[in-house]
Image (cartoon, rainbow, N blue to C red):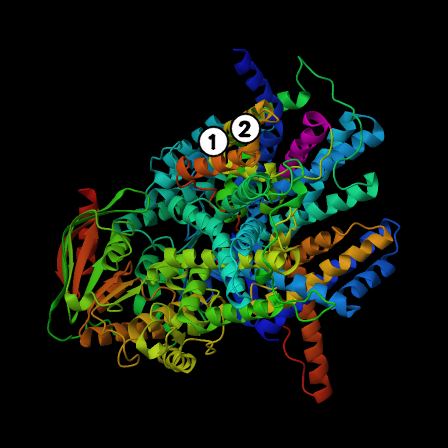
Amino acid sequence: MGDPPALELIGLTKIFGDTSACVDVSLSVGRGEVVAVVGENGAGKSTLMNMAYGLYRPTRGQVKVAGRALDLGSPRDAIAAGVGMVHQHFMQVAPLTVAENVALGAEPRRRGLLFDRREAERAVSELAARLGFAIDPRAIVADCSVATQQRVEILKVLYRGAEVLILDEPTAVLAPAEAHALLDTVRALAAEGKTCVLVSHKLREVLAVAARVAVMRRGKLVAIKEAKETDAGELAELMVGGGARAAAQAGVGAARGERIAALRGVRAKSDRGVVALDGVDLELFAGEITAVAGVDGNGQTELAEVLTGLRPVDGGALDLAPSARAAGAIAHVPEDRQRRGLCLPLTVEENLALGRQRAKGLVKDGAVLRVDGPARARLAAELIEALDVRPRDPHLAAASLSGGNQQKVIVARELLAAPPRLPGSAPLRLVVAVQPTRGLDLGAIANVHARLREARDAGAAVLVVSLDLDEIRAIGDRIVVMAAGKVVCELPAGAEEAVIGHHMLAGEAHA
Amino acid sequence: MSAGARTLALSAAAMLSALAVGFVAILLTGKDAAEGYAGVLDGSFGSFEAVGETSVKAAVLTCTGLSVGIAFVVGLFNIGAEGQFIAGALAAAVVGRALHLPTALHVPLSLLAAAAGGALPALAAAWLKVRRGVHEVISTIMLNWVVIYTVQDWLVVGPLRAPSSSAEVSASGTAQIDVTAELPRFFEDSRLDVGLPIAVVLAVFAWFLLSRTVLGYEMRAVGANIEAARAAKIPVARRLYLAMALSGAFAGLGGAFLILGTEHHYPGVFRTGYGFDGIAVALVGSSHPLGVLVAAACFGALRAGATRLQLVGIHPSFAELIQGLAVLFVATRAPFAAVLDRAARALERARSARRGAAPPARKGDA
Amino acid sequence: MILALSILRSILDFAPPLVLAALGGVISERAGVVNIGLEGMMRVGAFFACWASFAWGSAWIGAAAGIAAGTAFAAAHALVSIHGRADQVVSGIALNLIALGLVTFLLEAVFGTTGTAPVETLPELPSLLGRSPYTYVALVAPFAVHGWLHLTVPGLRLRAVGEHPHAAATLGVSVARVRWAAVLAGGALAGLGGSSLSIAILHRFDNKMPAGLGFMALAAVVFGKWTPLGAFFASLFFALANAGVDAVRSAMPPSGPLADLHLDGILLAAPYLLTLALLAGFVGRAVPPAADGVPYDPEAKH
């Protein structure tokens, strides 16, 4: 073995203030190898890769590329060293074209200052052809599909001569077939001699394409396994440390009750004015959890918004049962927690009262509606305890909480700030939760799922939109699949992943 | 250090730094800075009369500060406090002249008119924002100029001009208000009037509204995150209108204090800048009613004492320079916050060392 | 015909301050830094241009001084907003307040007055074809800036930084450097625009300067949808409105029944009302660059 490893991480440690995000992680990856780094959310995978890419400076430790030790102060240094990152959240400038996005920062020039647009477009087409797909370099990125945007990300790093590619949760936003296409691309890259590091928590995909799997837990590297010698179950155990994964069981809920919501041929437009809901037919019943599966961007967001009254209906009929029309009878765990769910500058206690500030249990009598401070404090303490929000201080600004804890605050408020904990408020009749467990660790996920089942058993109709098929299969009493703005089919609880995936894409194809 | 104490410390640091920079600036122009500053102190607190002047100005600044502050709470930049101030002042002058009632009725009525007058341009800006998406910084500034020109170059020289003066002599303004509309004063030899206690009551009212009522909570939510507030079914547009109406009303009341308390008519030349100072007061006071009171007192003192600067050859507008610097320093929290944090840590370490325990882990140094 | 020509001449004379300041605003905001301080930058530009051209007897030096003053002010804005990550609107407002007081202060210190700088005539720039050089600069600059933004590499990077700074940063573009350059360029243009007021149009410095023109330029930026050409045409339109008002005002008889109505105030207010009406009616929901006004924090979680 004469060649130095393509990428070597030696004793990498990163400490933010009080938190150790990453402790003494060492990993060596050979040229042309595909290695996966897996772990729960918050295990430190992203932090580790951000250090390899120069976005963070390591507190301790070293990064070596092709045998040379590097001081990566910025992504520019990493790019120069041949390390490229394909981010989970695409880093694209929406109004610019594909070619402009790919070439940004390394633009071909004419006469010094002028941007050689044609050369950039030519280079993009050529790179795409080598990887086996076609792409229009003049397309505006904002108009491209998610899968295409991801390809732009990959082209970006290849354009800069990356020899080592780090892919951060690449299949998070892809349908099963698109994910397979991506894994094919990874194999093609490896065949060309490029080294790939996949950061993911999708264990089955990772095992399908990686040679070795490194497991991280709570900032430490706990194991490196040969892919051939392990399986998803063992990896999962290593990820959570011995506790068995919460059994994926569809709960046996109460029998279907009253019909809470009926959508017939509902149409609605998205924020951009494009048709998002194209004739949705759906009925939601009390005592039942309906899980909505679908590739991101097929109308699930708009469905949730239409049910919660945040988006007007352009056509068709949306009927709510009278009991669901009372103020506070509908709970909404929004997709974008920071945008819709929380007022970050306000305290945790104040956020827990959001939407319920007029409930009888939280106001003092009088001519002017005054805030009942002690009642709010009591409610806050209960909710924080119930969902295990950390830190426990209700007077902290919501902005200072981690993403996962912010999510817990929202779930606590929406699902629990109702009778009997909050007297005088209407009983929950409809719960609309979009990606409710995003950013949460296994224990918190189990807690949230339990609360959703509680709400269902108390007589609410629960709608859960999720991009995670494991969650869909675990929580849904029934599963509906959305594609191209319609509900394309209904499946029983625990349906096979392949079946769900097939409907997700078949529906899209008929768009 | 609690969040409130920290904000207070930051504002104080900003204020002191601005004064320090001003001191150096005067020295650089070769004038006697020490004597100038001493004069300012004397002119603001050095005598009974001086304290009265400071109080009068502080009262007006409290009003304009609350005006800008309450708009900030819902996330709006009301730069139009100057125009709203003028509109309110004119309204007070008109109602003060047009009626003759016992003081206990006349003064409140005139104040009400001023509040309404100030609220109008503010509501116009709110409407433009809510229904047409026009950024309030631009609309309030444009409305400022509209109000200023309309009032000062048309109404006050034309239809509302005091009848005895000729068309050319515009310096005279409107007719004197009826004596029953004058704000009662407390003492013989001071211009201190009921404006100050009323201003304090207004501040308390604002504090109560914002921190103790559901309406105030909803307003704060709107300012913190309008999307989340909307998702929580808070009637966002109505809260914006309410905040701007109150904002304009506060500014208008400030104008009324000046007219009913000291000027006793709307003068021909009346560019006071209290509205713009209100921006500085609100920012330095962190939009908190108590902070506004304190900041208004500081800036009021500065204004009252600034006339003394002329004795040292410096133009009183220097005070505006200090104000602008204070706002700039408040906006740039980072360096001040860093210094404060380091000082707080050093204090903590000193305390722990004295107690003999190990010093706490150094935060934020990674 | 003669009226049309004279109005055209008025616009060409009055447009440069608005056009230049609005261009400065566009450059700064397209890079993601809100610039409310255009008014203050114009003010210091106007004053220092007057002072320098008087002190050195050359209008060229005056123009240079105006540019330098605007740039210096912009540097303060850049320091506070980019390095200090302060609220950009507050910083702009603070700078306007400082400009207000500082210039009055200096006016008193240097010229001994607080009204108009008592200089009989300021040196003028040589006129080309009867128009001041400012006019030509104002006609060419918008197209130059447009070309810069869309055809050059720095222009591409500027647009990227204003929409998605983190994306640009991950590709190795220095967000801070691009924004600094944009803000300074904006200040230089605003200062130049301000200088045109004192040494080209009015030939004196008036303590009211720029009398809200900086904010009108901001309105032109919004009205022009944050593009150089849009801001250019919007500025021309506002200059036309101002010229129209001026024409009506000077045509008003000094005495008689029309004079007794004292309509001067309404006439003066008209351009601002027009600006508001246009912003309300024609612009619709104008969308600024996506990252406009948001301080860039490289360590923030994305």
Mark identifier at residue A120? 1
Q: Image quadrant for the C terminus of chain B?
A: bottom right
- Residue B35 in the image: state x and y as whole percent: 87, 60
Image height of B303 relative to A249, above or below? above
In which quarter of the view is residue A441 placed?
A: bottom left
Question: Can residue A128 be seen from the camera position used here?
Answer: yes
* Res B364 visible: no
Side (left or right) of B4 relative to A283: right
Q: Quadrant of residue B269?
A: top right
Q: Residue furthest top?
A: C1
Question: Which residue is identified by label 2?
Answer: C257
Marks 2 & 1 on one chain: no
Extent of the magenta region: C184-203
Q: Is residue C188 in the magenta section?
A: yes
Q: Which mark is residue B329?
A: none
Q: Residues within 10 Å of mark 2 (few under 14, many from 20)?
A: few
Q: Vertical placement of A121 versus B73: above or below?
A: above
Q: Secondary structure at mark 1?
A: helix
Q: What residue type is disc 2 on?
A: Pro
| Number of numbered callouts drawn | 2
Q: Quadrant of the N terminus of chain B?
A: bottom right
Q: Main secondary structure of the magenta part?
A: helix
Mark 2, chain letter?
Answer: C
Question: Residue B310 colored magenta?
Answer: no
The answer to whether A322 appears left or right of B219 in the picture is left
Q: Chain of mark 1?
A: A
Q: Nearer the viewer, residue A231 or C168?
A: C168
Instruction: Say whether residue C131 is left or right of residue C1.
Output: right
Question: Alpha-carbon distance for marks 2 and 1?
Answer: 70 Å
